[in-house]
Amino acid sequence: MADSSSTYLTATADAYDAVADLYADLARDSLGRLPLDRAMVAAFAELVRESGRRRVVEAGCGPGYMTAHLRDLGLDAYGVDLSPALLDIARRDYPDLRFELGSMGALDVADGELGGLISWYSIIHLPPAELPAYFAEFRRVLAPGGHLLLGFFEAEGGPVVAFDHKVTTAYRWPIDELAELAGKEEFVEVGRMLREPLEDERFRRGHLLMRRL
């Protein structure tokens, strides 16, 4: 279990609280123009449905649009986030869904309870040395055979590198290195997708779909 009291978590929550309305307005309809991204999420949802364990968590749910999308794909989805302001927006926009305040590194979930976990551009704010503990937490809450989907900014052949994310410090990861780290916590790769940046995006997007052994 990751340390839920770490200062970087407080800094991240405060940064998102400060721009919550603007961030939610920009993010809310973002999936509509991203067919490749939606395809990865659809594949994740199909695999979770087939497993018979439809309960999933969006770890780092922000304003809740992805949690709602997962619900629309037939999953029993709920969201967890550090930012009270973003959670207020999520609860307002999707009152039929459950959203909890908390760290994705210390989920209030029993061992092996979930069929799936999605971290959609939320691991990007974790200092690299902290990430293994989060993967260990993801493994703990997923049932054997459960699926994990990661969305992140990809390093395009370079090493892990910090960059000036518009909200707070974030990191770009080489997709192979991220897959290797997850592999150390008993995740095996099912598939991956690299998408080149759109005209208004700066970096390549990476997506990893993995299964817990």
Image: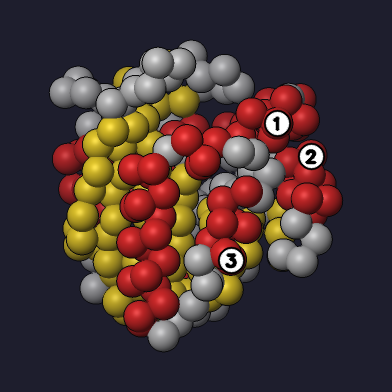
Q: Is residue 38 above or below residue 188?
A: above
Residue 98 drawn above or below residue 177: below
Amino acid type of the residue that numbered disc 3 sits on in the rendered structure: Arg
Q: Is residue 138 visible?
A: no
Residue at image point 30% right, 76% down: 145
Which numbered disc covers residue 3?
none
What amino acid type is highlighted by mark number 1? Asp
Q: Position of residue 192 (x, y in %)?
A: 22, 48
Q: Is residue 66 left or right of residue 85?
A: left
Res 100 quadrant in image: bottom right
> Which amino acid lies under the numbered mark 2 shown in the image of this protein?
Ala
- For marks 2 and 1, give the CA distance: 13 Å
- Residue 150 position, x and y percent, is 37, 48
Left or right of 162 in this view: 14: right
Is tag 1's residue or tag 3's residue first in the polypeptide sequence? 1
| Residue on which disc 1 sits | 25
- Which of the two discs, 2 and 3, labels the residue nearer the N terminus? 3
Mark 3 surroundings: few (<14), some (14-19) or many (≥20) residues within 10 A: some
Look at 56% across and 51% down and name the residue there.
66
**Figure quadrant of residue 84:** top right
Residue denoted by label 3: 71
Residue 161: where, in percent of width, then height? Answer: 32, 20
Q: Which residue is mark 2?
A: 85
For mark 3, give the secondary structure.
helix
Image coords of residue 82 (percent x, y)? 67, 45
Res. 58 in view: yes
Question: For numbered disc 2, what is the local secondary structure?
Answer: helix
Q: Which corner quadrant holds the C terminus?
A: bottom left
Disc 1 element: helix
Near mark 2 (Cα within 10 A), the count class, few <14, some 14-19 or many ≥20, is: some
Residue at 78%, 50% (x, y): give it.
93
Instruction: Report the front residue among 111 and 59.
Output: 59
